[in-house]
Amino acid sequence: MQKELATLKYSLRSPFLDIGKAEDSLLLIGMGRSGTTWAANIINHDKSYRILFEPFFPSLVKEAKDFEYIQYMPSDDNNPTLTSGAEMILAGKPRSQWVDRDNNGLLYRRRLIKDIRCNLMAGWLKKIFPHLPIVLLIRHPLQVAASWRRLGWGTEALGQRSDLQIITSQHRLLKDFPQIKTIANQIDPKSFLDNVIFLWGVFHLVPFQQLQRNKIYYLFYEHLLTQPEKECRKLFNYLRKPFSWEQVKKAVVRESSTNFHKRNLSQEQHLLLNGWKKEFSGKEIRRANEILTMFELDTIYDTDGYPSSTSLCR
């Protein structure tokens, strides 16, 4: 009841109109700390989208209340309750200070759904909404791990379970991807690094296998940072969105609301790309590579930490 009252009060204070249809949505996904908020702001540089900030958060969004904190969905699943929840979210039904934190317009015809909990159901969402554009943002696993360690992440927000426990408790996921269970048995659950690299593997293995390359856009954080004009041009072409670098570049250098470390993108580019080399020891880096090799994801990045030009996301 409290959530409903809060939603009503927020709607009265922020009476914007969202007249877009479900097919007017696009989905931007990625692992937490991969740069999804930054990428969303770049795509929405002209404020033409209503951004729905992480609407699949079950503890904070009533339309997502039946989803797991990190939900796996097989592509062929037809669960009516979860399908209804996804339909409401893609149709822009959620309204709250959490979801609409980045919106201050009055009328929206399109919406951008930005979420860090959708990687394991991207194939399912694409099956329900075949015309839904999906952008998967990828960032170097050790750079993600470094950020997680500084922020103390790895445990369910507003809960007590570890992300590892949430993943390994989903029996259908382990059945559909038996290598996940095999690898889970080979990592140290008390090791922070083992946990995050394992999660990175799961968060990328599943969408890589569920979705063909022509059904999803793979956006590398490193490309967006080092060659933004080239990468934005390709991204906007995929989204069929008009592109003007003069307009977009202002959003590229603008700090996002989730830049918790207050990093300057231009002045600290080397830390954003290669900070992990100083954060982790040689032994830790080798261990991370061992886990990525188990997932057969060790060739996504080269030894210098850049996306490999010869690698294809499987």
Image: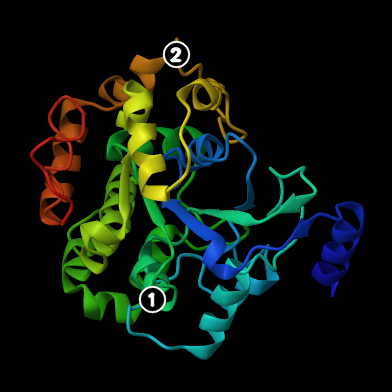
Q: Nearer the viewer, residue 289 or 67?
A: 67
Residue of label 1: 73
Q: Report the side of 295 relative to 54 (left or right).
A: left
Mark 1 and mark 2 lie on one chain; the one further toward the N terminus is: 1
Identified by mark 1, the residue type is Met
Q: Position of residue 128 (x, y in %)?
A: 43, 78
**Which residue occupies 71% across, 63% down?**
19
Identified by mark 2, the residue type is Ser
**Which residue occupies 37% across, 25% down?**
229
Q: Nearer the viewer, residue 7 or 146?
A: 7
Determine the residue located farthest toward the front in the rendered image: 242
Dot 1 alpha-carbon crowd within 10 angstroms: few under 14, some 14 to 19, many 20 or more: many
Determine the residue located farthest toward the left in the rendered image: 310
Q: Report the side of 163 relative to 3 (left or right).
A: left
User: From this viewpoint, is residue 172 visible?
Assistant: yes
Quarter of the figure with residue 282: top left
Q: Nearer the viewer, residue 47 or 145?
A: 47
Rounded to the nearest angstrom, the CA distance separating label 1 from label 2 is 39 Å
Vertical placement of residue 253 versus 197, above or below? above
Q: Position of residue 50 (x, y in %)?
A: 65, 51
Q: Position of residue 32 (x, y in %)?
A: 45, 46
Residue of label 2: 266
Dot 2 alpha-carbon crowd within 10 angstroms: few under 14, some 14 to 19, many 20 or more: few
Q: Position of residue 310 (x, y in %)?
A: 8, 39
- Label 1 secondary element: loop
